[in-house]
């Protein structure tokens, strides 16, 4: 491995994110699109301002990750999923920015407008996790044991997402920390 550069086919030298899929491809998010690198060549996925074909919602890729044969990308103009089996792109955030995205096991989660969403792989869309709409979570963090933790906007509650019931279980912060 000698390095990767624009001269070899990378769309831009400003790299913002990197992930690897199950086939060994390296996916590189840049300030000018997404690149799939097979060790020899690049395939570029670029933003189409005409918007007549599904694809990445904007050139500057902020985050990427791989989950269940999908490459997920987020930009300031929304998020999208690329299904590697079908070769199809799906817009998943209705043009709204995604603050964070993460994989826990074989599940994909997204934070948008301080709410938690899970990606439905059958419907190719985000589904809001079931907790009160007035509840505003400022931060979600996956733990090493596969849990998803959150803290309220006012920093008075800590929450753990229950994957079976699909609910947030809250505890006052002063009770949660010894």
Image: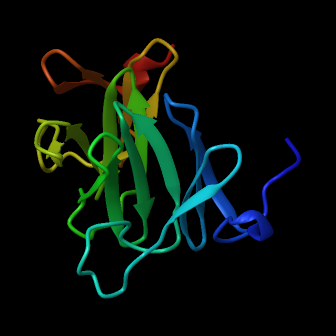
Whole-percent x and y of residue 47? Answer: 42, 75
Whether residue 140 appears in this view of the structure is no
Task: Left or right? Give the position of 88 relative to 101.
Answer: left
Q: In this view, does 112 lie to the left or right of 71?
A: left
Residue occupying the point 33% across, 45% down: 110
Q: Residue furthest right?
A: 2
Closer to the camera, 17 or 109?
17
**Residue at horizontal 34%, vertical 59%?**
79
In the depicted structure, whether residue 76 falls above or below residue 82: below
Decide which of 108, 41 is in the foreground and name it. Answer: 41
**Relative to 129, is 46 above or below?**
below
Q: Can residue 105 be seen in this view?
A: yes
In the image, residue 167 above or below residue 99? above
Provide residue 64's location: percent of width, then percent of height.
49, 49
Residue at 15%, 50% (x, y): give it.
Answer: 134
Which color scheme does this rendered protein use? rainbow
Residue 138 picture location, percent across and down: 39, 48
- 58 displayed left or right of 159: right
Residue 56: x percent and y percent? 38, 66
Residue 99: quadrant of the picture: bottom left
Name the quadrant containing residue 103.
top left
Q: Which of 113 and 101 is in front in this view?
A: 101
Q: Which residue does the image show at 51% across and 13% down from the upper left?
A: 178
Q: Which quadrant is the N terminus positioned in? A: top right
Question: In the depicted view, which residue is nearer to us: 79 or 28?
Answer: 28
């Amino acid at each position: 491995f000698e390095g990767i550069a624009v001269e070899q086919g990378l769309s831009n030298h400003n790299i913002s994110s990197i992930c690897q899929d199950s086939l060994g491809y390296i996916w590189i998010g840049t300030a000018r699109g997404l690149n799939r690198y097979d060790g020899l060549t690049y395939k570029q996925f670029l933003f189409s301002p005409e918007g007549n074909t599904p694809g990445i919602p904007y050139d500057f890729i902020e985050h990427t990750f791989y989950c269940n044969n999908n490459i997920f990308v987020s930009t300031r103009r929304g998020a999208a999923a690329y299904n590697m089996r079908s070769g199809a792109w799906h817009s998943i955030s209705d043009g709204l920015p995604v603050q964070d995205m993460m994989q826990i096991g074989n599940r994909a989660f997204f934070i948008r407008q301080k709410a938690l969403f899970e990606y439905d792989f059958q419907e190719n869309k985000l589904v809001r996790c079931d907790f009160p709409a007035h509840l505003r979570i400022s931060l979600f963090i996956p733990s090493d044991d596969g849990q998803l933790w959150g803290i309220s906007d006012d920093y008075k509650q800590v929450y753990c997402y229950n994957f079976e019931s699909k609910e947030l279980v809250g505890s006052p912060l002063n009770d949660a920390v010894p």
